[in-house]
């Protein structure tokens, strides 16, 4: 039995995504911002299903932050927050301190095809909309890979085969090499735009399932930076400074509770790829998978996004960000994370917490 008002909606709840911005409404709002504010809007080509890939920017500063939201179509809260940030900064809101120092880029909804089913109140998908009969060979996934792909596994297209063989020798297949075409046009659009604007920092916004820490408190946000050893020290330090700022921006605010995401080192994912390329790169994983929570992933989760956006932009503009000690992020590892129980309360809760603590405290 699920505890009333607990962390999960009842299993009998109907699937409902009406609280979120549809693709059509998203494009309309971005056109409106372009016409009425200082936001610049551009369509970076089309998805496999013919939808525009929506990009926007605001500000004129020399430090370039590139946010990519909703690479996975079912991970939507940061997109809602990004629209509010664009609205407020585009209108000025007295934030010349930010707009004069930063240029803030948004791939507002990286994967519109993945979100599209939700516009009809059906389950959105993690992958993009590549047709089932379209195939390619991939160095990470082998021969004859067909159909929809995960946009967050295609960032290696910014490298040549020699570089990949060096930075990811255990995963890269040199016999296949780099295909001629990226199976995610959405990701290729990001790669090209990041290179064009020479972004200093990439922030990759996702959602995850529901986890708890060693005290059995629910985790709202998990953070990570490039873990590939070939990422230059300068890029890793900037990434860790940003992770520290995000931690301070969410921990204890709106019941925020953060952890470090135990990600891998593969150079095909966003966080590691841009780190290897010499850019700051941070992964943000928030609680709020659409199929798990539906409309319940609105509200407070978006507030956490807004708090983190605000903290990053203010610290980057003021210079406080680069004054942070990168090693601060290393000290955050001992906040553990594990699956949250769906059925609460548990009769063996204390015993389970103790076992979890013994197993995971020193596992990172």
Image: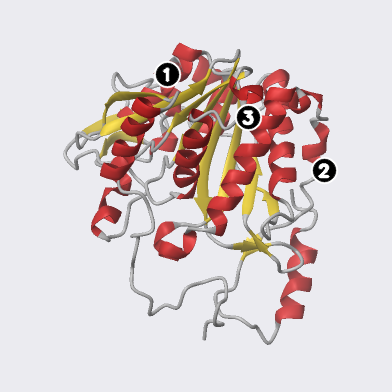
Q: Which mark is residue 246?
A: none
Task: Determine the residue positioned at 71% across, 62% down.
Answer: 213
Mark toward the viewer: 1 or 3: 1
Disc 2 to disc 1, C-alpha distance = 34 Å
Residue 325, by quadrant, is top right
Disc 1 to disc 3, C-alpha distance = 23 Å
User: Residues at badges 2 and 1 in contact (C-beta under 8 Å)?
Assistant: no
List x then y, in percent, for residue 343.
Answer: 56, 80
Q: Which residue is mark 3?
A: 228
In this rendering, is residue 132 above or below 319? below
Mark toward the viewer: 2 or 1: 1
Q: Residues within 10 Å of mark 3 (few under 14, many from 20)?
A: some
Viewer-side residue, 157 vs 102 = 102
Q: Number of numbered discs present?
A: 3
Q: Residues within 10 Å of mark 2 (few under 14, many from 20)?
A: few
Disc 3 to disc 2, C-alpha distance = 19 Å
Would residue 79 appear left or right of 238 to someone viewing this image? left
In this rendering, is residue 55 above or below 254? above
Residue 131, by quadrant, is top left
Q: Residue furthest left?
A: 133
Q: Which residue is mark 2?
A: 331
Task: Determine the residue positioned at 38% across, 38% down.
Answer: 109
Viewer-side residue, 122 vs 275 = 122
Viewer-side residue, 90 vs 250 = 90
Q: How are the residues colored?
A: secondary structure
Q: Which residue is mark 1?
A: 193
């Amino acid at each position: 039995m699920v505890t009333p008002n607990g962390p999960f909606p009842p299993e009998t709840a109907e699937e409902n995504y009406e609280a979120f911005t549809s693709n059509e409404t998203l494009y309309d709002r971005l056109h409106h911002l372009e016409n009425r504010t200082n936001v610049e809007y551009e369509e970076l080509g089309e998805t496999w299903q013919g939808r525009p890939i929506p990009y926007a920017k605001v500000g004129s500063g020399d430090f370039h932050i590139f946010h990519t939201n909703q690479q996975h179509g079912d991970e939507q809260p940061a997109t809602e927050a990004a629209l509010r940030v664009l609205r407020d900064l585009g209108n000025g809101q007295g934030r010349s301190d930010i707009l004069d120092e930063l240029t803030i880029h948004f791939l507002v909804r990286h994967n519109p095809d993945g979100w599209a089913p939700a516009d009809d109140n059906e389950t959105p998908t993690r992958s993009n909309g590549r047709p089932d009969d379209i195939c390619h060979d991939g160095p990470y996934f082998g021969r004859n890979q067909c159909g929809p792909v995960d946009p967050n596994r295609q960032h290696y297209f910014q490298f040549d085969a020699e570089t990949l063989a060096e930075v990811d020798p255990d995963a890269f297949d040199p016999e296949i090499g780099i295909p001629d075409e990226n199976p995610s046009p959405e990701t290729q659009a990001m790669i090209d735009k990041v290179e064009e604007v020479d972004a200093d920092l990439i922030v990759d916004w996702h959602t995850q399932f529901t986890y708890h820490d060693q005290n059995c408190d629910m985790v709202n946000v998990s953070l990570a930076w490039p873990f590939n050893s070939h990422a230059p020290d300068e890029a890793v330090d900037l990434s860790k400074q940003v992770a520290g700022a995000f931690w301070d921006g969410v921990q204890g605010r709106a019941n925020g509770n953060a952890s470090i995401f135990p990600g891998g080192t593969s150079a095909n994912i966003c966080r590691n790829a841009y780190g290897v390329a010499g850019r700051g790169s941070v992964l943000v994983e928030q609680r709020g998978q659409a199929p798990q929570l539906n409309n319940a992933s609105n509200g407070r989760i978006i507030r956490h996004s807004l708090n983190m956006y605000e903290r990053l932009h203010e610290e980057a503009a003021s210079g406080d960000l680069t004054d942070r000690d990168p090693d601060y992020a290393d000290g955050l590892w001992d906040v553990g994370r594990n699956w949250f129980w769906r059925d609460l309360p548990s009769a063996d809760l204390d015993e389970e917490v103790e076992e979890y603590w013994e197993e995971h405290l020193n596992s990172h």
